[in-house]
Image: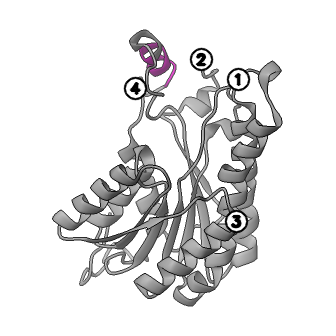
Amino acid sequence: MVLIKGDVDTSGGLKVIQLAGRRALVTGAGKRVGAAIARALGRAHLHVAVHYHESREGAAAVASEIQDDGGTADLFAANLYEPQACRALIDSVVEKLGGLDLLVLSAANFDRVEFKDITDEHLTRALALNLVAPFHLARHAAPALRATRGSIVFITCSSAKTPYKNHLPYVVSKGGLSHLTQALALELAPEVRVNAVAPGTVLPPPGMPAEAVASLANSVPLRRTGTAEDIANAVLYLAQADFVTGQEIAVDGGRSTARTGRF
């Protein structure tokens, strides 16, 4: 349920945060899951800061779609591999939007590499974007989020608990992000809630053969792969759940419960 301005909750005392008119930053919003999250927040009538690094065309399309639907969106470019750029992004968004209520950290890299071929660069890249950047963004956004009693939603991965083979740098970085969720929930309480969504069998990699996708879907208890919209719906829930913090929601069709391998 997404409440808009003027809605009054009558569901037995359940407290739900109204989202309309609030301000959100979504990193990596130019494609895939980040784009779906930005669109969903736009449909919920938030003012969306659409971040991108290399996917300007996709980010511009997302912003235009939000605006065409009557929403408000602005584009922000930043190279999140650089800590100073993370801090500058938060400053720019807070200044432009007049504050911040929701920070959704979706930008990530996903390099497939066999263990024998892992280099220092692979590990550095994964940690820099998937763990260090979210930390810098969250830490620098904390004062603005405290002022609005806002929230943070990290996009982690089911591989943080059940590792994927041949993705060690990615899996390690997402494992750190999962733990950061809990640590920050303690550090920023009670003013700021911090949660995570852990996608599993969602959006198979581009170019994956059809038979491999079918095999992947067959390993899921719900017998299908998920969509980016499934992740966006979970983000919307966490943005409104006033008494939820330090939690990681697996959106994987039950695959983590079945504990099967990824490939």
Measured in 3D between alpha carbons, the distance from the residue under mark 3 to the one under mark 2, in whole angstroms, is: 34 Å
Please state the horizontal and vertical placement of residue 52, each as a whole percent of the image: 46, 57
- Tag 2 or tag 3, which sits nearer the N-term? 3
Tag of residue 83: 3
How is the rendered protein coloured?
A: one colour
Between tags 1 and 4, which lies in front? 1
- Let me know if residue 80 is in the magenta part: no
Return the residue found at the far top. Answer: 211
Q: Secondary structure at mark 1?
A: loop
Q: Residue at label 4?
A: 224
Drawn side of residue 52 relative to residue 68, left or right: right
Name the amino acid type tagged 2.
Phe
Name the amino acid type tagged 1.
Asn
- Tag 1 or tag 2, which sits nearer the N-term? 1
Please state the horizontal and vertical placement of residue 166, each as a whole percent of the image: 70, 23
Quadrant into which the C terminus falls: top right
Q: Residue at label 1?
A: 166
Name the amino acid type tagged 4.
Arg
Q: Residue at label 2?
A: 263
- Nearest the camera: 168 or 185? 168
Drawn side of residue 250 relative to residue 72, left or right: right
Q: Secondary structure at mark 3?
A: helix
Q: Which residues are magenta?
A: 213-220
